[in-house]
């Protein structure tokens, strides 16, 4: 470390590559410098100009070869450094070779493996942070992050966007009668119904307790209402196959489709939630839309 600090003090190149190449350059010129100093000391410099020229040419050729070789040897270190910087700055996955068995090759393979493992771990943690552990649907944190962006994108690109807000009817009473374990299973069945009914383009979210919502990009009011009907039917069929037919589970839903007056996601959600209250006032087990 002291030698490293000394090199910086005397003004050697700041880059790692520059320092190594400078050391190589000085090292390969030591024999030439020693020869010239010895000849000067003996007073024979003029008598040995031919020999000095030969040594000088040989030194320059050797220096050029050494510098090229060192540059090639440093390339894996520079590639590994660039890969780490790219992942740290832009989370860009590297594509380093992993087939070389020397020390530099093992360095690149280690960087490649470590970054890929780290990236998978980060993806898992990110997924867990936005996923409801019981149902596997997205949670409110995901909705807070993505809802506003989806509304902005739909408005900018003039695409339809619909939102379903869903509530399990009289779920507290159902829990009291059948137990929380059965109640949790019902919530899982509702989540499965949401996935089935909303299709690959829908995004199901558990808001908390027995409350859910579904974001439906590219779905107008009619398509969203059809998705709501499929979710209600899938829920009824799933519950009938799991519990006694007498244990009825129904859903109340509110639907809102993005309109010219909707500037924010909160506004869209408020309209869908108002329609959910309308469904409950009208006797539950139905879908109301605005």
Image: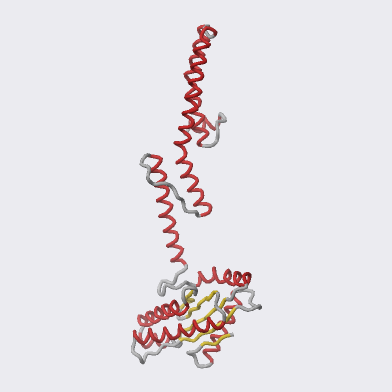
Name the outermost residue toward the right: 261
Residue 239 placed where, x, y %? 38, 85
- The answer to whether residue 125 is above or below residue 262 is above
Q: Quadrant of residue 124?
A: bottom left
- The answer to whether residue 123 is above or below residue 211 is above
Residue 33 placed where, x, y %? 51, 17
- The answer to whether residue 215 is above or below residue 13 is below
Horizontal relation, residue 64 to residue 270: left or right: left
Residue 229 placed where, x, y %? 48, 85
Image quarter (top left, top right, bottom left or bottom right) of the C terminus: bottom right
Number of numbered tags placed on the structure image: 0
Horizontal relation, residue 104 to residue 26: left or right: left
Residue 75 placed where, x, y %? 47, 39
Residue drawn at (41%, 75%) of the image: 135
Horizontal relation, residue 135 to residue 265: left or right: left
- Closer-to-camera residue (49/79): 49
Residue drawn at (51%, 23%) of the image: 60
- The answer to whether residue 76 is above or below residue 20 is below
Residue drawn at (47%, 90%) of the image: 285
- Closer-to-camera residue (162/262): 162
Colouring scheme applied when the structure was drawn: secondary structure
């Amino acid at each position: 470390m002291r030698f490293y600090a000394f090199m910086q003090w005397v003004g050697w190149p700041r880059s790692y590559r520059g320092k190594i190449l400078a050391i190589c350059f000085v090292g390969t010129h030591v024999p030439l410098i020693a020869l010239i100093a010895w000849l000067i000391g003996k007073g024979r410099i003029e008598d040995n100009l031919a020999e000095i020229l030969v040594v000088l040419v040989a030194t320059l050729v050797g220096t050029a070869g050494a510098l090229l070789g060192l540059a090639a040897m440093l390339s894996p270190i520079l590639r590994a450094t660039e890969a780490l910087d790219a992942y740290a700055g832009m989370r860009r996955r590297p594509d380093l070779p992993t087939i070389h068995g020397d020390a530099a090759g093992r360095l690149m393979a280690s960087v490649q493996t470590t970054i890929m493992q780290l990236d998978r771990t980060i993806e898992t943690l990110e997924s867990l942070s936005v996923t409801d552990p019981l149902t596997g649907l997205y949670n409110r944190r995901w909705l807070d992050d993505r809802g506003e962006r989806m509304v902005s994108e739909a408005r900018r690109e003039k695409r339809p966007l619909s939102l379903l807000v869903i509530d399990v009817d009289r779920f507290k009473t159902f829990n009291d009668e059948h137990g929380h374990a059965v109640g949790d299973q019902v919530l899982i069945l509702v989540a499965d119904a949401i996935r089935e009914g909303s299709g690959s383009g829908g995004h199901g979210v558990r808001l908390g307790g027995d409350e859910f919502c579904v974001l439906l990009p590219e779905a107008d009011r009619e398509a969203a209402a059809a998705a709501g009907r499929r979710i209600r039917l899938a829920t009824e069929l799933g519950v009938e196959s799991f519990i006694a037919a007498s244990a009825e589970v129904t859903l109340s839903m509110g639907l809102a489709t993005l309109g010219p007056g909707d500037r924010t996601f909160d506004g869209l959600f408020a309209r869908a939630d108002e329609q959910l209250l309308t469904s409950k006032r009208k006797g539950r087990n139905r879908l109301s839309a605005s």
